[in-house]
Each structure stands twice: as C-alpha cells, then as structure tokens.
C-alpha cells in the first residue's frame, strides 16, 4: 500500500495531514489555496520593495515550498493586521516593583498579537532579600515567572492559539536551585486525589501546574566556561541541571560566551538571541529537501533573506519600543528545514557530511552578503544577525519534511493538535520515510529516526554543534532520549552525559532534551508503521485533553 497523496486543490502537499493543517491554520478568504497564499504573502510583504521578476520568483519558491515564511507570516498574509512576528524577546530590566508591572504589560501586549515571549529574569533580587523602602523581604523571581505564566494561560495568542512562553535565570542567581526543581510536578500531591500533579496532568494536561505554560532554561556565561576549561569541573548547578533535564526535560541550557555573553534573551523556542529588551524574531526557512542544486540554493537564500528584510519594514508591532529595537538590530531568522530528508536523499547518515558543509557555507555567506547589500539599497539600518534555525512545527508539516535540523522523528507516529476547543489526532507516516519505502522497497524498521538516535546522543550533540558553526544566533533542537530509569537514561548515565555536553558547550548556544514520557500530553507518539498506514488521513477526537507545547515550543517558524 502506497502513502502517496494527491490533492486537486493543493497538489504540492505530500499528505492529507499537510493539507488539513493548511485548512485549519492558514486558509482564509484571501488565500483559499496554497498557490493563493504563496502569492498573497509574497505581495503583502515584498510588493513595495522587489522588482516584478524577483516577486514572481519569490512566489514560485514559496509555492514550491523551497522557502517557507514563518507561521505568523502565513497566518496574517492578506489580513488587516500584519503581526508577522512569531515571538518577542523581553528582559526584566530593573529590580523594582514598577518593572514587574511593566514586564506584565509588555508580555500581555505581545501575547495578544499572536507572538510568544521569552524573558530573562536574572536582574530580580532573590527570595528573602531585604526591601529597604518597605521593611519587608523580597519574594524572589519565581512569583514573577508565575505571574507571566498565568497571563499566558488566559491569553489566547492573537485569538487563535495557546501562548508560548520561555523563562531563563542565570546560574549564579541565588534562586537558581529553586528554579531548577520548580517544575518537578511529581513531587506535588493534588489535594483530595492522592495523586501527584504529574499523574493528574497526564490525565488532563490543562490542569494548572507551576510554570506549565513556560519552557525554562539556565543561563551560563563566560566565567562558567573558563572555570570548566581550567579545572574540568562543571559546578553543582550544571550537574543538577543535567540531572533534572534527563529526568523531566527541564530546565534546558542557554550558553552565552565571550562577545555574546549578554545575549541571554531568547524567543519562546530559543533560536533567536538578543541582549536588548523588546527585540523581535523574524522567521523563514529554506527547505533543503526541495532544493536540488547549489545554484538554486544561492537563489533561494538571496530571496529568502530579502523577504525577511522586507518583513522588518512591513510587520505591525505591539508597542513603540519594539519598533525602535527592530530598527536598531533588524534581526533576521533565516533558518533551515528538511536537513535529514536531504541527507536521506543523498544516502547519508545523520551527520554533517562534506557536501552538507558546502551547502551550509552557501547558506551562511550568501545570507550575509545579501543582507548587507539589500539593506544598503533600501537605505535602512543593517542586520545585526541573519540566521536562526527554528523548530518548524506547523510549516514542517505543511512541507511534509523533517523539521529544523531534527532527524526524522519516527517512521510513523500519532500527532495531537488543537482544533477549536477540542484536541484531535491523526496517524502520520513520515513523507521522507514513505518515499524510501515506495521507491526503494526499504523496510520501515531500517530507517534511522530520532528514536533510534536516542541511544546515540553524542552524535546528535555533535551534529548540532557542526551546524551551529554556520549560524550567528541559535538553533532550536530537542534531543529525544529514552525514559528516565531505562538502561540508557538513569543515574549511572548522568556523569557521562554531563561531561559530553560540557565539552561541546562552547560550540552551542543552547541545549534541550526530551526523555520519553517526561511530560504528559506529548504531541508526538511513535506507533508501528503497519498501524498508522491503515488509518492515515482519518481524524480522531481525543477523549482526554492533551497539549502540544511539550516539545519545546514546536509552533515556531
């Protein structure tokens, strides 16, 4: 039985699930088909700035899914409001009650446009510190994080999707040990149930819990790295952080060294970096799986870069400071998707091969030169950064390819998603895997996936470091791991994992992992190919509410 899918309206889509996501999230009166949406978004964003021939070619690239603008571009194309930006980067700037109020206002203002937020809270004084003006003691940073978390619970982003929030804290902050364990839901007993909060949330993920709307990471700076290089010691915080991540998936790690030490701000999915409060992410991705030659890659990089620069001139923003910071930095987040499918097409394992190095070199150098030249032509401020690799959740499904730099998650899986106010799921067979099965008779069980690589985390970390060499911001990537307590993830494996990550830290901007089953309601669940292929294209209503925010904010990009 073949997994081929053909749509009369949107022939580019590889699966019914891809078309369903288009119809659910992006189709509207100004874009009834993918062709119409491609034309609409190209004209809306770049119609005032590109020559006619460039505009036509950009439309073709989007239509053919060689370049995909970020999800917010696709959603707002043709609408009255042009909130094209996926996320906003915020900073607790002063250790004052006025700043708490200001941060809450900025956060809600951003969330209500449809954008996620990321906040560094490190400036706030720790719990128990004296308050000279009132004679009291400080409550610390955790209540501030919970205020923003609860705002996210009540604000449906842009009226259309759940809030995406990120929080970070410096490893030297006195509250960091409380921060590390704040999401240990298995240690909270829900009154009247006799069950832990983890168990209750596994049955219904919308049940409230500490920081349940928020992904969290610890910030590590140059002093930490130099001490590790000099002594070989990672320190107690790093060790505890690693143990927590292997058990519960959080906190993650945010690495900020030397000339980028102050770039502790991240968007909700962590790929965009900044040191300036109210900065903004600006996302679009090259689809390596659809680009066939280096010459074509150069053309797509050039127009993709120009598209994002035009976006910095066209997008509506939530308040004036964001506009000022955008003009100052003009950050681009030109990313990549479909890398693992590209490797499969080239009959390569999941590693950065010499040929992939050449493709990444074109990605880097052409985006740099195009950004410099095009901003000069438009007489606008230059771009402070050009590249960031997002997780590509929804647009990866649209393109039917592997997301970001991630390996193929599984040959077949069940994917849950929000539709209206109810959670649904479909069975999905990965498009790249299906082509191998159809064209070459490959056995499903022989295809390498993220679940296979869960037993080879060193290869995953090395791959991320090799790609990071070409990216001037960060990469959103989550390494899948076996469940805590299994043979490959337990107390005996923590030290080796700690040393491996520390040895690569200077070549990374961040790290997150996801032990299987560590959070209730995970959006993707591997299933046997034989089970999925019988039910591909059917939609089921989830009997119990679940949430698709556990895979490190997979809605970005």
Image (spheres, rainbow, N blue to C red):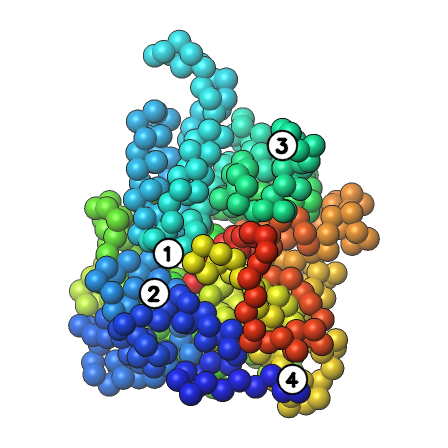
* Label 4 vs 1, first from the N-terminus: 1
Name the residue at 70% across, 73% down: 531
**Dot 2 surroundings within 10 Å: few (below 14), some, or many (20 or more)?**
many
Q: CA distance from mark 4 to mark 1?
A: 36 Å
Q: Nearer the viewer, residue 457 or 108?
A: 108
- Looking at the rendered image, the disc whose residue lies closer to the viewer, 2 or 3, is 3
Q: Position of residue 86 (x, y in %)?
A: 37, 57
Whether tag 4 and tag 1 are in contact, CB under 8 A, the answer is: no
Element type at mark 3 = strand
For the N terminus, the quadrant is bottom right
Tell me which residue sits at (37%, 78%) in the image: 34
Percent x, y of residue 293:
47, 86
**Do we see residue 350 in this rendering?**
no
With 553 as the anchor, is 478 left or right in this view?
right
First along the sequence among labels 2 and 3: 2
Q: Are marks 2 and 1 in contact (CB under 8 Å)?
A: yes
Residue 538, by quadrant, is bottom right
Q: Which residue is mark 4?
A: 436
**C-alpha span from label 3 to label 4:** 48 Å
Q: Which residue is mark 1?
A: 160
The dot on residue 75 is 2
Residue 172 higher or lower than 86, as above or below: above
Q: CA distance from mark 3 to mark 1?
A: 31 Å
Sort mark 1 into few (<14), some (14-19) or many (20+) by Cα contacts within 10 Å.
some
First in residue order: circle 2 vs circle 1 = 2
Distance, label 2 to label 3, CA atoms, is 39 Å
Residue drawn at 46 percent across, 72 percent down:
20
Mark 2 or 4: the one toward you: 2
Helix, strand or loop status at disc 4: helix
């Amino acid at each position: 039985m073949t997994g081929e899918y053909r749509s009369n309206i949107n022939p580019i889509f590889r699966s019914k699930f891809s078309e369903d996501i288009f119809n659910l999230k992006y189709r509207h009166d100004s874009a009834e088909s993918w062709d119409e949406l491609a034309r609409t978004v190209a004209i809306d964003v770049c119609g005032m700035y590109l020559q006619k021939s460039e505009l036509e070619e950009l439309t073709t690239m989007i239509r053919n899914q060689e370049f995909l603008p970020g999800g917010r571009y696709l959603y707002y194309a043709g609408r009255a409001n042009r909130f094209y930006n996926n996320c906003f980067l915020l900073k607790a700037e002063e250790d004052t009650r006025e700043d708490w109020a200001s941060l809450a206002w900025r956060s809600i203002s951003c969330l209500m446009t449809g954008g996620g937020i990321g906040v560094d809270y490190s400036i706030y004084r720790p719990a128990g510190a004296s308050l000279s003006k009132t004679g009291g003691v400080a409550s610390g940073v955790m209540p501030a994080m919970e205020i923003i978390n609860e705002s996210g619970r009540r604000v449906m982003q842009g009226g259309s999707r759940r809030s995406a929030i990120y929080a970070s804290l410096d490893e030297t902050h006195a509250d960091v040990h409380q921060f590390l364990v704040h999401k240990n839901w298995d240690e909270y007993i829900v009154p009247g149930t006799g069950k832990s909060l983890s168990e209750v949330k596994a049955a219904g993920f919308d049940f409230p819990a500490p920081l349940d709307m928020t992904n969290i990471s610890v910030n590590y700076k140059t002093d930490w790295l130099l001490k590790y290089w000099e002594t070989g010691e990672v320190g107690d915080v790093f060790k505890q952080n690693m143990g927590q991540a292997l058990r519960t998936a959080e906190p993650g790690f945010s690495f900020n060294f030397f000339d980028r030490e102050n770039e502790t701000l991240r968007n909700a999915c962590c790929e965009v970096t900044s040191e300036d409060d109210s900065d903004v992410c600006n996302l679009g991705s090259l689809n390596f799986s659809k680009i066939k030659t280096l010459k074509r890659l150069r053309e797509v990089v050039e127009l993709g870069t120009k598209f994002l620069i035009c976006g910095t001139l066209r997008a509506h923003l939530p308040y004036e400071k964001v506009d000022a910071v955008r003009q100052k930095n003009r950050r681009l987040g030109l990313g990549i998707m479909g890398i693992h499918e590209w490797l499969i097409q080239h009959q390569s394992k999941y590693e950065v091969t010499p040929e992939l190095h050449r493709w990444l070199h074109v990605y880097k150098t052409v985006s740099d030169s195009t950004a410099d030249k095009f901003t000069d032509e438009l007489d606008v401020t230059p771009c402070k950064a050009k590249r960031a690799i997002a997780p590509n959740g929804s647009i990866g499904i649209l393109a039917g390819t592997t997301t970001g730099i991630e390996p193929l998650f599984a040959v077949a899986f069940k994917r849950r998603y929000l539709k209206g106010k109810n959670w649904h799921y479909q069975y999905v067979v990965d498009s790249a895997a299906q082509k191998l099965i159809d064209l070459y008779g490959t056995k499903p069980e022989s295809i390498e996936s993220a679940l296979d690589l869960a037993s080879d985390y060193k290869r995953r970390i090395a791959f991320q470091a090799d790609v990071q060499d070409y990216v001037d911001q960060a990469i959103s990537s989550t390494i899948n791991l076996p469940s805590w307590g299994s043979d490959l993830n337990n107390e005996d494996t923590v030290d080796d994992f700690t040393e491996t990550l520390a040895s690569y830290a200077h070549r990374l901007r961040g790290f997150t992992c996801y032990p299987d089953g560590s959070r209730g309601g995970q959006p993707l669940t591997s299933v046997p190919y034989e089970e999925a292929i019988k039910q591909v294209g059917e939609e089921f209503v989830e009997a119990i509410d679940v949430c698709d925010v556990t895979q490190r904010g997979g809605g970005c990009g």
